[in-house]
Amino acid sequence: MKKTLILFTVLLFVFTSCSDNFEDFNTDRKHPDVVPGEVLFSNAQKELADYVSNVNVNINIFSLMSQYWTETTYTDEANYDLVNRNISANIYSRVYLRVLKDLNEAKTLIENTEVASIYAKQKSNKLQIIEILSIYAWQHLVDVFGAVPYTQALDINNVYPVYDSGADIYSDLFTRLNTALTNLDNSAESFGSADLYYGGDVSSWIKFGNSLKIKLAIMVADVQDAVAQTAIEAAYNNAFTSNDDNCLMSYLTSSPNYNQLYADLVASGRHDFVPANTIVDEMNTLNDPRRDAYFTLYNGAYIGGIYGYANSYNVYSHISEVIQQPDFPGIMMTYSEICFYLAEAAERGYNVGHNAEYWYDEGITASFDFWGVSDVSTYLTNPDVAYTTAAGTWKQKIGIQSWIANYVCGIVGYNNWRRLDYPVFNLPETVTDYSDIPVRFTFPINEQTLNTENYNAASSMIGGDLISTKVFWDVH
């Protein structure tokens, strides 16, 4: 009895004195329920860069849609089959769940974190940067689908969100972006090393935000000219000024942190893509020196696979070795991309400091510099390239050169083709009419079955859930 009493007393002491620690035994420290907002922000950046860089046909086919690349054996996607692999649903999953949801949760956690007054500006900067990156992701969804769940999205308690029109979403994105840029404070810090794009440099995010404003504005220029002009004229002086400002994701040489281009082109062991004859032929015609940075030679020449047809991997040029390196950067936005938008803006009569020819030449020069290609001056004097002598309207000149410069940035090439109608694409094997080339992606199939009422309303709102239905800014 005495031994039992002693044992009970010892156990009681242990339970009483260590009660605060027993919960630790039930806590999985490797998989916490709550992580810091900064970690979620980093993860969202990585997921977004991986998605943008990806060329897996189940996830991101914009290098095919822009006819930079074509397929070798399986040609469904180059022939615009968007349904068989449920690509739309995979885009939704990547952007909504892996990017926007993480950014939204990061925002909530950081908002709810109490900080000393001396860190208030740093906290605010974090929130503004999250907002700007969210706007980048939202724009992408609108540009792909035309309308998406927005005001009711990201709410776990609402699994049947309504769709907002693309025009309404863009309008709100402008408002949000202006507010974020106003509230960014260059005198304070932000994420530091948790920012995988700019290392927490607030001045770089100010330039990125203004460049994003230019991108948003040029997309709506054909339907909201006054809105576009006001936004671009307010932003261009504070936007990117050189390749030093490029928004890039720095990848490493080892898994899982290498570029998804490397994952798809090399690590997979597959040979699914070759450069498309669409871009190779155009660059051959112009004798473009960037070919060596973009493609390999085959039998002493640059030869592209026939777009949308089966192509033997062994008898065409390949994607260059530079692009296939595991640490090739993820390209989010570049100075070259913005220069071509400003060339457009100048042609539309907006005040952007220089004329269209200046920005056109600057965009080409920045592209040569990015790829490490020399002798841009000779290229710019080529009569087929020089702005004053190249064939066609300004839309043709800018459209073709912007398309070439944005190689591997498939969504940029696809968007600009839809807006400017240049370059002229090739027809794949199963398509007989140019008007059958998709100008948007259809909504995910599971939206039709699980969110039927709102899907039907959205389909009616945009004029039908068809690949031929243009997004609101595509009016030509």
Image (tube, helix red, strand yellow):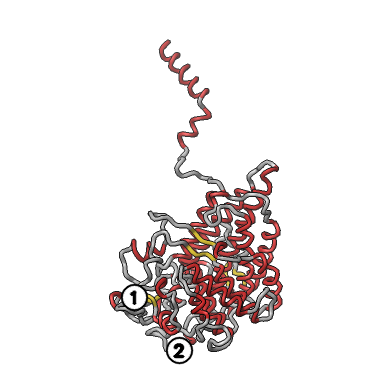
10 Å crowding of disc 2: few (<14), some (14-19), many (20+): few
The amino acid pointed to by label 1 is: Leu
Q: In this view, does 476 lie above or below 209?
A: below
- Residue 247: x and y, percent? 54, 62
Which quarter of the image is occupied by the C terminus? bottom right
Which quarter of the image is occupied by the N terminus? top left
Question: Residue at coordinates 55% horizontally, 59% vertically from top-left?
Answer: 100
Residue highlighted by disc 1: 297
10 Å crowding of disc 1: few (<14), some (14-19), many (20+): some
Q: Earlier in the sequence, mark 2 or mark 1?
A: 1
Q: Which element is circle 2 on? A: loop
User: How far apart are the two marked residues, 2 and 1, measured between alpha carbons?
Assistant: 32 Å
- Residue 344: x and y, percent? 61, 78
Q: Which element is circle 1 on? A: loop
Q: Which residue lies furthest to the top in this view?
A: 2
The amino acid pointed to by label 2 is: Asp
Question: Residue at coordinates 42% horizontally, 59% vertically from top-left?
Answer: 327
Residue highlighted by disc 2: 433
